[in-house]
Amino acid sequence: MTSGPADAGEAMGSAARAPTGGMPPSRDRGAPTEKGTATPPPGTGQAAVGAPVITDVAGLQTVIDTLAGQGYTVIGPTRRGSAIVLAEIGGTQDLPQGCGDSQDAGTYRVTDRRDEAFFGFAATPQSWKAFLFPSRELLWSGAAAPGRLTVTPDPAPGKPMAFLGVRSCDLHAIYIQDRVLLGRAYTDPRYAARRADAFIIAVGCSDPSSTCFCVSMGTGPAPSAGFDLSLTELLRDGRHRFVARAGSERGAAVLACLTAPTAGPDDLSAAQAVTDTAAAHMGRHLDTRGIRDLLYASADHPRWDDAASRCLSCTNCTLVCPTCFCASLETVPDLTGEHLTRQRVWDSCFTSGHSHLSAGSVHGTTRSRYRQWLTHKLASWVDQFGTSGCVGCGRCITWCPAAIDITQEAAALRVPAPHDPAPGGEPA
Amino acid sequence: MRKLAVWKFASCDGCQLTLLNCEDDLLPLTDQVEIAYFPQATRAVAAGPYDLSLVDGSITTPADAERIRQVRAVSRRLVSIGACATAGGIQALRNFSDIGDFSSAVYARPEYIDTLATSTPVAAHVPVDFELNGCPIDKDQLLTVITAFLRDSKPDIPSHSVCVECKQRGTVCVMVADGIPCMGPVTHAGCGAICPSYGRGCYSCFGPQDTLNTRSLAGRFAFLGMPEPAVARTFRTFYAAAPPFATESSMHSGGGR
Ligand code: SF4
Ligand code: SF4
Ligand code: SF4
Ligand code: SF4
């Protein structure tokens, strides 16, 4: 069984710790939007707290040390083999200095920027979902005696995490997962606890990749809210500096440790220029006008057959997507049957098990599975959660081994089918 | 006490070794299961019928084609284990050639060889209750299967792609990040995506996954620079005779079989 889009599933308990700021995310989410612009939960830094300051590499190290000293595990980008991945870091020496990336449909390469930049790359292969909603999680273990099952809940999550380098698209993806996992009748207590603890240091993007389209989705490139700290990296005049803003009281407290000077007008305009340049260099575009209705009206479009001829039904797009939340629940007994564990594992609408009911899979063909993915992301997500399920991070494009591009597939649906079948008619 | 039997047909015995390697894991079962027939582990033979028969190996001789019927007749549940038993194994490469050519090339007196023209899975001969993939099978999956059959429940063995496991363990995709051809997207999960975690492409030792698209993946291999004969060979290894792989490899083998 899969806890899917219309099914909160039993993974969700009831006793959730509230997210940062002590307020649960609002159920009242205002008018639905076809963009991925979910708003952060109230209390998570709707506006800057205090004036922006200017700091340097040593200042960034102080931020990392301060958070580590407060008991956080600091997670940030680091080079591992052929990619820049998110992992625990000890300091700025672990950041992928001078690394950029070159991404396109089905391809990713780390590049040499020939500069000092720590954050001069775009989306990492995995998002922060891997930490807040891990791929496999023990929910409980139990001991069975005849007629009796004793359940031991999994102990609460460990050390709080600090995320360094959260991009604006991924921040919006976190707000979207907040709505899915915290904003409904049943909340996921483990997610809630990790989320409440997470200290978020956002970074404004400077070098979007050719698969980025956050501008289309209204989710970037500059982080606007929902962070504890936000950095913009500046590399002008041979000086490596950061404009830093606090977005919460605890962020402001960390910044206060730096005794950094207030950023001047030059620094602020340089930071604005980084954002403007990034916004002007989006690699891709998704036309969101009326996209919900477009998807619903396109159920019989022949493009689905074309996509199905290329799609491997491999699940990569969904597992790298920072908003996809489908998981299945596994009960694993030991050989004696006296002990068992209940685990939640990532699942995807591209597996046949995802929609398996007594008579077989509801989505029995790749055509149907691909249509489910795109329709959920861009249309039914709006009805379900009030925003698009896509924040324009481009991961599903880059990490699709078959180089399928969500922006191209959505655009193709705008082209009327040559022999448009009657509405509601059987697909060809 | 349930009776377990383990039968060997044409195979390297690796899958039976997987069962032997379970060692300590199997100890809790000693009061529930009697190993009634398992020549590789014990000479003791208990008469059938058996509650669960694990069958290792493919059917390659007329005698084996008869013997598998007898095994089925004395087994309440029959589970075929491994690439040989579920798809014909590496020895099913003979299915794409003439067995007579092999026999005369290898044996001094080929007339002594009494073999079938093809290597076929158990399910091609008798009904099978469950097929467990892998070359060799995975130990934990085998334990899952045995546990499930002891409780008369269906084993929870996902049939999705290796990519699921690859992403679950946080490996960076070698096909996207390194341009290395990888069979993961068409391959049945079960190994835990070992090869990509060592920077290599998946070789598909667990056979086809259940929602696969070999055509598209072969196209991607060509895009990555793989020559046609290599595409054919890539689909023609442990699971050469599994129908989706056999069809795909034949499309790249220069018009031959
Ligand atoms: S659908 Fe694709 S581009 Fe949109 S958020 Fe998910 S992975 Fe990113
Ligand atoms: S698109 Fe993502 S969230 Fe929606 S059904 Fe598929 S895997 Fe689940
Ligand atoms: S769209 Fe791409 S990544 Fe997604 S299931 Fe299909 S082939 Fe895999
Ligand atoms: S490395 Fe192979 S198994 Fe892993 S995601 Fe890529 S294609 Fe799939």
Image (spheres, rainbow, N blue to C red):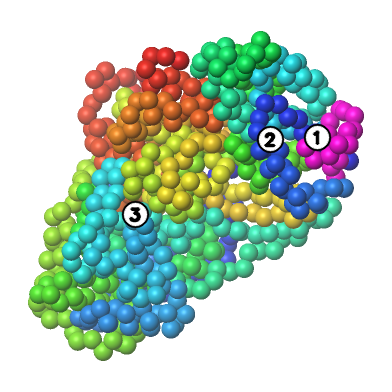
The verdict on residue B42 being magenta is yes
Q: Quadrant of residue B154?
A: top right
Please state the chain letter of the residue tagged with numbered disc 3 in the rendered image: A
The residues tagged by marks 3 and 1 sit, at their Cα atoms, a distance apart of: 48 Å
Q: Amino acid at mark 1?
A: Pro
Please state the chain letter of the residue tagged with numbered disc 2 in the rendered image: B
Q: Main secondary structure of the magenta part?
A: loop
- Answer with left or right where residue B4 lies relative to residue A273: right
- Up/down of B143 relative to B36, above or below: below
Q: Where's residue B138, x and y in %?
A: 63, 43
- Up/down of A271 relative to A142, above or below: below
Q: Amino acid at mark 3?
A: Ser
Crowding around mark 3 (Cα neighbors within 10 Å: few <14, some 14 to 19, many 20+) is some
- Who's the residue at 35% across and 65% down the image? A78
The residues tagged by marks 2 and 3 sit, at their Cα atoms, a distance apart of: 38 Å
- Mark 1 element type: loop
- Who's the residue at 14% across and 68% down the image? A272
- Up/down of A247 relative to B149, above or below: below
Q: Amino acid at mark 2?
A: Asp
Nearer to me, B198 or B166: B198
Q: Which residue is mark 2?
A: B13
Q: Which residue is mark 3?
A: A82
Nearer to me, A289 or A405: A405
Residue numbers of the magenta segment: B32-50
Q: Which residue is mark 1?
A: B39
Please state the chain letter of the residue tagged with numbered disc 1 in the rendered image: B
- Who's the residue at 57% across and 53% down the image? A344
